[in-house]
Image (cartoon, coloured by chain):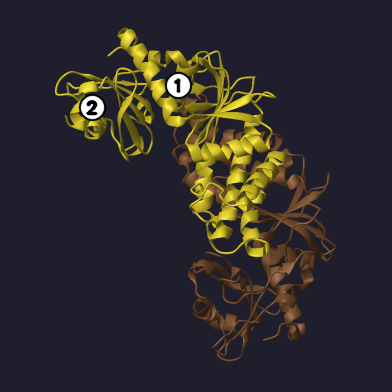
Chain colours: A yellow, B brown
């Protein structure tokens, strides 16, 4: 039996995380086991509503059996107003086992797909320090924590382009904050005046050199202690490259300064996130390994305990929770 | 008599501010009066050392008399290591009437130009809170304050792509700090995720609407009070655009959010600069009118007095001070 036929025979549903710039899809059996993975670089920013079905079919078409409708559960920007169809934001506080209540079904022309788009979360300002904020995709990773651990509580950090910090209480998101950290780093390292001084491959070597490790941690501490110095310390990397006789030369020099830049942007984020942390709490880090390692170092330097959950594991568990809700109460998501 | 001939007959020297991305030149008579202005988009980043003389001649050639050598005094990135010829940084503290002592003469093939490149300033870390920093060009504007006012003292702010804060004491720069403010703003408004929410023409209307004015000042105050929230408040502009029913629509909406972004980046800079300000001091703002107006508003909101000096006036006075030094003590700048 071919691998493709085996997938089609065991396929129970498909999970999709469809972001601004790409999509990742998983073929799952009835027990939630991953049968196959697929992806595409066609994200929300490059698609019109009428493009989504064909893009999805070209990505996962090989998995589908010859007949029958396959449930497809999608989180992320495909549910944005500029996406396939809008799945309106649910305002916090929101129970994470209830995301399916906000799901919508986009128009699908073919007979093979039963598609539901999950909603994101939004937050309005209040006297308790909440600010305007939105997320699409990360709420499903948070739901994955609930799916795996029941009434999950405590602070959760999801590092990335737009890093999220969320507070969970008994399985609900009660507040969250987004930081522009990853996007800021990419620009500073690759396009700003600092590009002349940095290696751009940051993150790949994961602070392999002891000096890079020290530079990263020192930068975290400096900005956490004096966040108002952030803009000055950024330019300071350029000045240090021009003036500091103690820096290594060549590739190692750029790596050292890149480690320091990474520490500055993550340190500023931690300083901001501390405002919503309670002393002694353990932070749950959800995401890719290299980035979570860096955040764990930064948190440790600040005396904050953390534990880690793999990002793919979390999103699959969250999609599975929503899939179970939609399967058991199909009326909850009107066509 | 043609205008060109009049310039050539009265011309005593030429001042040039040659930056990374452009150059500005002034024809001056013996009393320092501006006879003409010229400019070019050919800055240090687009020139090899051998290109400078031809670029200068194509910009100011019309001003030159038929015979005789004309003194040309140049500040800015043309004196960087990657420029025409390196005029090594002078370390702070440095008396600003002594910049000419660090001037160098690049190789010039033609007989008509007597060129001197002025040095920039550098700073090394110390226990008094100084950090690695460099400037090239702004030191000449600071020298202009000394030329106009004698033993100038106090804090000086030069807004811009890389905004500078310098402390003057009795005509010397004792410390300074650079902030990436302008470059950060341009990226955030034009290229980051916020570009979808902002009008890019910021600065042109100069907060003409009362609501924009209020949004700018509120953002300054918020970040100055909680600089650690900077990264979160940046993303908050995007969320506000998606969620805030009280924002105006259309062009006015983008202008409101751009005013707020401007307040966030300037507020972060002020928070950092306050660390080197003494209570009750008056800040001297040197630069272009629209940007200085914005900084004056931000300083006022923070209860800090300021006064203003036009940027062109300052750089011309500084170039003039260096020109006088070089003319009276030509040996100070060896060929």
In the picture shown, does residue A303 fall above or below A238? Answer: above
Q: Residue B28's spot in the image, x, y percent?
A: 65, 76
User: Which quadrant holds the N terminus of chain A?
Assistant: top left
Location of residue B285 in the rendering, given as x and y in whole percent from the top left corner: 71, 53
Which residue is nearer to you in this view: B14 or B83? B83
Q: CA distance from mark 1 to mark 2?
A: 24 Å
Lower position in the chain sequence, tag 1 or tag 2: 2
Q: Quadrant of residue B73?
A: bottom right
Is there CB contact under 8 Å for labels 1 and 2? no
Specify the farthest residue to the front: A1
Q: Residue visible at 69% across and 59% down?
A: B133
Q: Relative to B319, is B198 on the left or the right?
A: left
Q: Quadrant of residue A109?
A: top left
> In this picture, is A170 found above or below B309?
above
The residue under label 2 is: A7
Q: Using residue A221 as the reference point, say whether residue A250 is left or right of it.
A: left
For the point 38% across and 30% down, which residue is it? A77
| Chain of the residue that carries numbered disc 1 in the rendered image | A
B316 and B48: which one is in front?
B48
| Residue B98 appears in the figure | yes
Q: Identify the mark at residue A100; answer none if there is no mark.
A: none
Q: Residue at x 81, y 53 (%)?
A: B128
Indicate the secondary structure of the residue bearing disc 1: helix
Where is residue A133 drawn, in percent x and y?
A: 52, 27
- In the rendered view, would you say B239 is above or below A189? above
User: Mark 1 sits on what residue?
Assistant: A144
Q: Nearer the viewer, residue B27 or B155?
A: B155
């Amino acid at each position: 039996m071919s691998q493709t036929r085996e997938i089609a025979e065991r396929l129970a549903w498909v999970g999709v995380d469809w972001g601004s710039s790409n999509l990742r899809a998983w073929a799952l059996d009835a027990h939630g086991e991953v049968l196959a993975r697929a992806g595409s670089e066609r994200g929300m920013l490059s698609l019109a509503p009428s493009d989504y079905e064909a893009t999805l079919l070209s990505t996962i078409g090989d998995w589908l059996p010859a007949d029958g409708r396959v449930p497809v559960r999608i989180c992320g920007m495909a549910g944005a107003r500029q996406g396939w169809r809008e799945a309106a934001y649910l305002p916090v506080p929101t129970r994470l086992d209830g995301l399916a209540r906000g799901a919508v079904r986009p128009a699908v022309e073919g007979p093979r797909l039963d598609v539901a788009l999950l909603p994101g979360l939004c937050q309005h300002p209040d006297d308790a320090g909440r600010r305007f904020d939105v997320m699409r995709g990360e709420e499903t990773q948070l739901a994955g924590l609930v799916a795996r651990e029941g009434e999950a509580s405590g602070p959760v950090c999801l590092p990335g382009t737009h890093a999220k910090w969320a507070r969970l209480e008994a399985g609900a998101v009660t507040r969250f904050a987004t930081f522009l950290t990853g996007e800021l780093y990419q620009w500073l390292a690759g396009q700003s005046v600092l590009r002349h001084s940095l290696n751009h491959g940051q993150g790949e070597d994961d602070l392999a050199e002891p000096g890079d490790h020290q530079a990263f941690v020192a930068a975290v501490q400096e900005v956490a202690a004096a966040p108002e110095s952030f803009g000055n310390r950024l330019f300071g990397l350029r000045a240090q490259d021009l003036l500091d006789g103690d820096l290594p030369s060549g590739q190692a020099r750029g790596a050292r300064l890149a480690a320091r830049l990474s520490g500055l942007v993550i340190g500023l984020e931690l300083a901001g996130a501390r405002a919503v942390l309670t002393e002694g709490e353990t932070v749950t880090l959800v995401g890719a390994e290299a980035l979570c390692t860096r955040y764990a170092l930064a948190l440790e330097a600040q005396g904050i305990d953390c534990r880690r959950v793999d990002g793919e594991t979390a999103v699959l568990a969250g999609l599975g929770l929503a899939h179970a809700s939609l399967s058991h109460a199909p009326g909850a998501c009107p066509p």
